[in-house]
Image (cartoon, coloured by chain):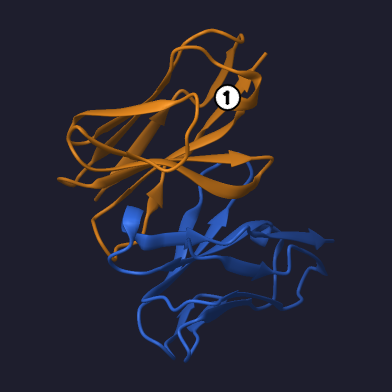
Chain colours: A blue, B orange
Amino acid sequence: GQQLNQSPQSMFIQEGEDVSMNCTSSSIFNTWLWYKQDPGEGPVLLIALYKAGELTSNGRLTAQFGITRKDSFLNISASIPSDVGIYFCAGQLTGGGADGLTFGKGTHLIIQP
Amino acid sequence: SQTIHQWPATLVQPVGSPLSLECTVEGTSNPNLYWYRQAAGRGLQLLFYSVGIGQISSEVPQNLSASRPQDRQFILSSKKLLLSDSGFYLCAWSAGVGSPLHFGNGTRLTVT
């Protein structure tokens, strides 16, 4: 199956700093999704990207669908304590099994006061 | 709007006991349904998915099974739990091909 490389694995940042994480793949995807998981809860969809080159914002979050269709990044500006959690990227290739969805292993964001 | 319910939230079961986790979706028809397992707070492993009643696809061989007795109901089962079955189990639904997944709040299973 397809593999996604999500980095960094963990981030230790100060409150107020900007955050950047990304996912890369050797294969192309039709859709990129970004999720956030709070401790003890299920992942929640943050942003969905459907076109190569697309740049989408959701409040302080911005995500882009790479022009090659093999990568995506998520930026968080001016981090706050509630941004703590695990962020997952997911690439989706229409027509693949199980909706052709492949998840990255997650970026664990820790904010130091 | 669509909602997904998963229960119980936590479960402690002895080795060798049976398991039944239930998931239901409201507000949509004929959703695709999924069971994932997450170990140690990282990584989502797809266990089963279903595109319709009675249609189950298994992604990994294991001690678990899934069933979909109704359109919006998905059940994860085991006849005899193993220690290695401990983990965080997540149910999810999607509207179909090309649509994002939406997750339930998960069940924390501890096998003792």
Left or right: where does residue B71 sit relative to residue B106? left
Residue pictured at 73% horizontal, 69% vertical? A8
* Image position, residue B53 (x, y; %): 17, 35
The correct choice, above or below, for B68 with respect to A66 in the image is: above
Residue at x 40%, y 88% (from the top left corner): A52
Q: Residue at x 50, y 81 (%)?
A: A70
Image quadrant assignment for residue B11: top right
Residue at image location 72% in from the left, 78% down from the top: A18
Query: Viewer-proximal residue, A77 or A71?
Result: A71
- Residue beneath label 1, please? B109
Q: Quadrant of residue A26?
A: bottom right
Q: Which element is circle 1 on?
A: strand
**Position of residue B22 measured from the top left corner of the image (x, y, whole percent):** 36, 26
* The C terminus of chain A - image quarter: bottom right
User: Type of residue at label 1?
Assistant: Leu
Image height of A42 relative to A73, above or below: above
Place of residue B68 in the rendered image (x, y in percent of width and height, measured from the top left): 24, 30
Q: Where residue B93 sits: x, y (%)?
A: 32, 47
Residue B95, above or below B62: below
Q: Chain of mark 1?
A: B
Total residue callouts: 1
* Residue in front for this viewpoint, A13 or A65: A65
